[in-house]
């Protein structure tokens, strides 16, 4: 059960920043860790309860103190980034390494910046680091209206890619406005029967089968799975097939955060926030995203 409580104010280590948090965003990983699903994840995040009392990864805020080895930031800087995997960011103060932070541009909205790290870096690395996408290629993005998905569409267009996006019928107009060249409504057309051909298939939703990847793509990147069983099935069917499927967990770094910041400053990347909660309603914010129907991001603000 989540509840608000007082904890000791953290003290930064030599390579850390003490940040007074102004905003957070919530991600599916937050409620997966809290609920301990899928169960295999408990090996990493806590067998019977989460190892960390405080959930959350994304944050933005103001540097209040720096460790003696910090060189990239100073007191008073506005920063954004990701807390270490497993939680800890949904708090009034956080201590994080300087290597997982980026500088907030002048005049940028701190709430929007808090929504960028996990979802934005995941989208960028899915396309570039693991998808190795090239200008002019055709990409199918399954799950294109959520947190990661709506960034994936925009970043792909910035990279000169022809984008076919998959979403529900209610999100068609939203995804078209993001820049998708073609949009498929999965509740009007069965994606498992779709006959399109693409250089890269990115599955943010996690429901595509091995047969789907082979039928539609030359290579694939899987961001998430709907279940552990589905993940195992895809991996087993790919044994010996040598079809290029990449699965990954995003690795936070300043360079990728700066790339996203540059896109935002140039007006090429926008954060869509569906709903904002005050920090007192953090449990409600996490519950809100559990049905996996969120358009864009959900934020938490500290006043």
Image: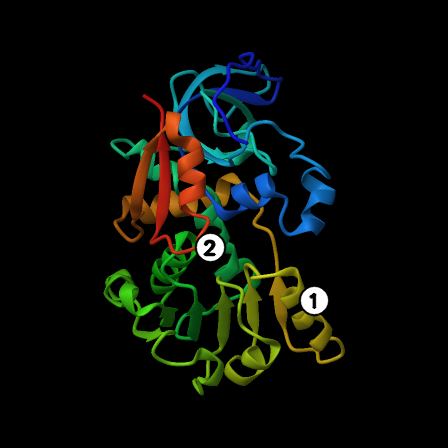
Q: Residue at label 1?
A: 232
Of 92 and 15, which appears nearest the observer? 92
Q: Residue at x 65, y 72 (%)?
A: 234
Question: In the rendered view, does 102 fall on the left or right side of 237?
Answer: left
Of 48 and 33, which appears nearest the observer? 48
Q: Residue at label 2?
A: 124
Q: Is residue 298 above or below residue 132?
A: above
Secondary structure beneath label 2: helix
Q: Quadrant of residue 142?
A: bottom left
Question: In the rendered view, does 231 fall on the left or right side of 292?
Answer: right
Front: mark 1 or 2: 1
Q: Residue at x 50, y 18 (%)?
A: 5
Locate residue 68, reporting x and y percent.
58, 14
Question: In the rendered view, does 289 fall on the left or right side of 154?
Answer: right
Q: Residue at x 53, y 43 (%)?
A: 31
Q: From the image, which quarter does the N terminus lie in?
A: top right
Give the crowd class for mark 1: few <14, some 14-19, many >=20 residues within 10 Å.
Answer: few
Q: Is residue 102 visible?
A: no
Question: In the rendered view, does 77 fall on the left or right side of 223?
Answer: left
Secondary structure beneath label 1: helix
Of 204 and 139, which appears nearest the observer? 204
Whichever of callouts 1 and 2 sits on the residue coming sooner in the sequence is 2
Q: Is residue 195 above or below residue 66?
A: below
Locate residue 70, reporting x and y percent.
55, 21
Locate residue 64, reporting x and y percent.
44, 15
Q: How is the image coloured?
A: rainbow
> CA–CA distance between discs 1 and 2?
25 Å
Q: From the image, which quarter does the C terminus lie in?
A: top left
């Amino acid at each position: 059960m989540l509840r608000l409580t007082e904890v000791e104010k953290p003290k930064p280590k030599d390579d850390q920043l003490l940040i007074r948090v102004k905003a957070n965003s919530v991600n599916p990983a937050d409620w997966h860790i809290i609920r301990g699903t899928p169960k295999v994840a408990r090996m990493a995040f806590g067998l019977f309860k989460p190892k960390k009392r405080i959930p959350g990864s994304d944050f933005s805020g103001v540097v209040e103190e720096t460790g003696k080895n910090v060189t990239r930031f100073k007191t008073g800087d506005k920063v954004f980034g990701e807390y270490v995997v497993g939680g800890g960011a949904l708090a009034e103060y956080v201590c994080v390494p300087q290597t997982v932070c980026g500088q907030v541009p002048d005049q940028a909205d701190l709430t929007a910046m808090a929504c960028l790290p996990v979802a934005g870096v995941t989208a960028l690395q899915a396309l570039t680091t693991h998808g190795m996408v090239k200008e002019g290629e055709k990409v199918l993005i399954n799950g294109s209206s959520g947190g990661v998905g709506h960034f994936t569409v925009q970043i792909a267009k910035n990279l000169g890619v022809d984008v076919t996006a998959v979403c529900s019928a209610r999100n068609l107009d939203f995804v078209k406005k993001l820049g998708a060249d073609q949009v498929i409504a999965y509740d009007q057309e069965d994606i498992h029967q779709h006959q399109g051909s693409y250089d890269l298939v990115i599955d943010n939703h996690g429901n595509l089968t091995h047969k789907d990847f082979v039928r539609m793509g030359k290579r694939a990147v899987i961001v998430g799975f709907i279940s552990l069983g589905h993940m195992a099935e895809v991996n087993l069917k790919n044994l010996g097939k040598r079809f290029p499927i990449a699965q990954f967990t995003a690795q936070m770094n300043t360079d990728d955060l700066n790339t996203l910041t540059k896109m935002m400053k140039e007006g090429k990347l926008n954060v869509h926030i569906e709903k904002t909660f005050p920090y007192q309603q953090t449990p409600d914010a996490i519950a809100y995203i559990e049905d996996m129907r969120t358009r864009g991001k959900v934020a938490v603000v500290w006043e």
